[in-house]
Structures are given as structure tokens and as C-alpha cells.
Amino acid sequence: MKRLLLALPLLLAAGCETAPEPYAPVQSVHYQAIGAEPFWQLTIGDDRIVLRLAGMSEDVVYPRTLPRTLDGITTWQSGAPPFVIVVEATAGPCSNPGGQTFENRVRVRYSGEDLRTNRPFTEELTGCGGGLARP
């Protein structure tokens, strides 16, 4: 019994360890999208737009702008040349490779400057966004 009492503080300390924090690039999430081939993740929060690309060690961050909706397409556009991002969300079901169906089809166009060649580039990504669509 005495050994159990001596071990009790160690057991309590081990039980108090917290789980690692989940990836949260923004404080309040307003919109999220994800794509595959290559993998990418987009999060739009209160103050910024964050694009995470497979193989990149750091996220690409743009100032947040308010969206505009025209002809059923919601668009966020941010940045200053050469670092610009345009996110377009179109209503309609979108299925990912994992079989989940989301509310929107999403296209992301972003541009920048290649650090190796100092040349401008523009990339386009497609994927799904918004919440999961109800069956």
C-alpha cells in the first residue's frame, strides 16, 4: 500500500499530460477546402488566408479579404503581385478521393516567384470545400 501511495503522484502527473495541439492555422475558421494530387489545404480565417501545400515546409499566408459572390461563385482574392491568391467556391456537390462529399467545388489560383530561378509562376489547384454535404 505504501508503494502505491508513493507511485500516485507519478501516475497523476502522467495522466495530466495534454495531447498535442491540432493544426490550426487561423483563430476563427470561416471557410476550408482541401485537394489531392498534389495534396493541399486552404483555411480562411478572421485575418488571413493560409495555403498549405504538400512538400512545403511553411504555409503560404495572405491577408484575408471579404468574399464576393457573383453568379453562384464565391471569390476571395488577396495579395499583391507577384504573391496573389484567388479562391473560387462554386455551389454543388464535390467528392474527394476518400469518398466524402462536400458542399462546394473549389479552384485555387496562386502566383509567386520561384526562389531558385527568380521567375514568376502561377499554379492552379482544384478540390472540395465548405462543409460535408448531407446525404
Image: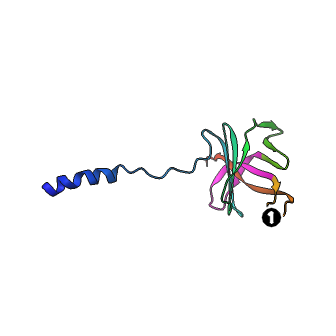
Give the quadrant of the N terminus.
bottom left
Residue 125 visible in this rendered orientation of the protein: yes
Query: Percent position (x, y) of residue 30?
Result: 65, 39
Q: As rendered, which of 122 and 101 lies closer to the eye?
A: 122
Q: Residue at x 81, y 60 (%)?
A: 114
Count the numbered circles shown.
Answer: 1
Q: Tell me the kind of residue under disc 1.
A: Arg
Q: As rendered, which of 135 and 12 lies closer to the eye?
A: 12
Q: Which residue is mark 1?
A: 116
Q: Residue at x 71, y 63 (%)?
A: 38
Above or below residue 7? Residue 65 is above
Q: How is the image coloured?
A: rainbow
Classify residue 47 as left or right of residue 5.
Answer: right
The reply to whether the magenta stretch includes residue 109 is yes
Query: Percent position (x, y) of residue 96?
Result: 67, 58
Query: Percent position (x, y) of residue 85?
Result: 79, 48
Query: Percent position (x, y) of residue 102?
Result: 66, 50
User: What's the magenta region?
Assistant: 88-110
The reply to whether the magenta stretch includes residue 92 is yes
Q: Residue at x 75, y 50 (%)?
A: 106
Residue 1 visible in this rendered orientation of the protein: no
Classify residue 93 as left or right of residue 100.
Answer: right
Tell me the chief SS of the magenta region.
strand
- Secondary structure at numbered mark 1: loop
Q: As rendered, which of 70 and 65 lies closer to the eye?
A: 65
Label 1 environment density (alpha carbons within 10 Å; few <14, some 14–19, many ≥20): few
Classify residue 19 as left or right of residue 48.
Answer: left
